[in-house]
Amino acid sequence: MAIPRLSLRRHLPQMPGHALRLRSWQILKPLTHAGLQPTSKAVYRRAPTRLLSRLWGVLTGLALPRWLRRPLLALYVWAFSVNMAEAAEEDLSSYRSLGELFRRPLKPWVRPIAPHDMVSPADGCIVHLGRVRRSRLEQVKGMTYSLESFLGPQDWREDGGQGLSPWWRRGHRLYQCVIYLAPGDYHRFHSPTNWHIQHRRHFPGSLMSDLRTNCARHVQGRYHDCSYLAWAEPAGVPAPKGAGLGEFNLGSTIVLLFQGPRRFGFRASAGRRVRVGQALGSL
């Protein structure tokens, strides 16, 4: 996955282009001299990601005085090309913190939901999509994972404990779609299809997520399960296509992993930008 870059050339055309392109890998250059790649597992292991995530959460949650909101938030909007015309609230002075702007809701009509079976759950750029082969997920934050390491052991149960859930049903295939959300993107995510949520598994500490699940009491390397069947039987919690599911407080990646029949076909391609509700594929 290419490391995103911030280009200010279109904002300041009078300056030379080479002086305006800020690449994130330049600040990581010392790591390459030490034999570490910016996307390597060694970097993630050594970086204090949970601490950085909490610090970012504190900074973005700081209440801004009203007189400072417009000039400060306008700088963020300018730097990351945020489209405030789509926001439900366009007045920057109405956002009490950077976090509120980051998680801004949109006008309901700017993200129509396509009638296809699978739609994009978020705004962003498709990094990778296709069939899951050799039980491996490709290009998740620049890395490849096995299903076992990414999802944990296959020990959750369906139907009130009757049998184990397989990775996919007979006659079906497993598919994946990885979407990267840039800082200026809309950072809420939605249901990609009509389904029921039966089980949740949280892995703390490995990624730089600033969610409520990033708590000190959660131990890195362990996962935490929650079943919804106990109170939402028999099928689980309904999640209609396009319904809001959650939000991010930091730069994010969505990994969409699903099973479908062999005739399923994607209507998108890697490198393409997508928006919530845009068609990803059909049966």
Image (cartoon, grey):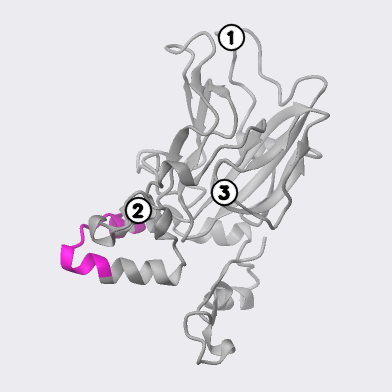
**Helix, strand or loop at disc 2?**
helix
Crowding around mark 2 (Cα neighbors within 10 Å: few <14, some 14 to 19, many 20+) is some
Asked if the residues shown at circle 3 and circle 2 are in contact, with their CB atoms under 8 angstroms apart, the answer is: no
Do we see residue 219 in this rendering?
A: no
Picture residue at 31% right of the left edge, 59% below the top: 98
Of helix, strand and loop, which one carries label 1? loop
Q: Decide which of 80, 176 is in the foreground and name it.
A: 80
Image x and y of residue 54, in percent: 35, 53
The image position of residue 119, as x and y in percent, is: 62, 38
Q: Are marks 3 and 1 in contact (CB under 8 Å)?
A: no
Q: Is residue 62 magenta?
A: yes
The numbered disc on residue 54 is 2
Residue 160 x, y percent position in the rendering: 55, 8
- Residue of label 1: 159
Q: Which numbered disc, 3 or 1, marks the residue that appears first in the sequence?
A: 1
In the rendered image of this protein, does residue 26 appear above or below residue 120? below
Over which residues does the magenta segment extend? 56-70
Residue type, label 1: Asp
Q: Earlier in the sequence, mark 3 or mark 2?
A: 2
Marks 3/2: CA distance? 28 Å
At x 60% / y 42%, what residue is drawn?
A: 120
Which label belongs to residue 275?
3
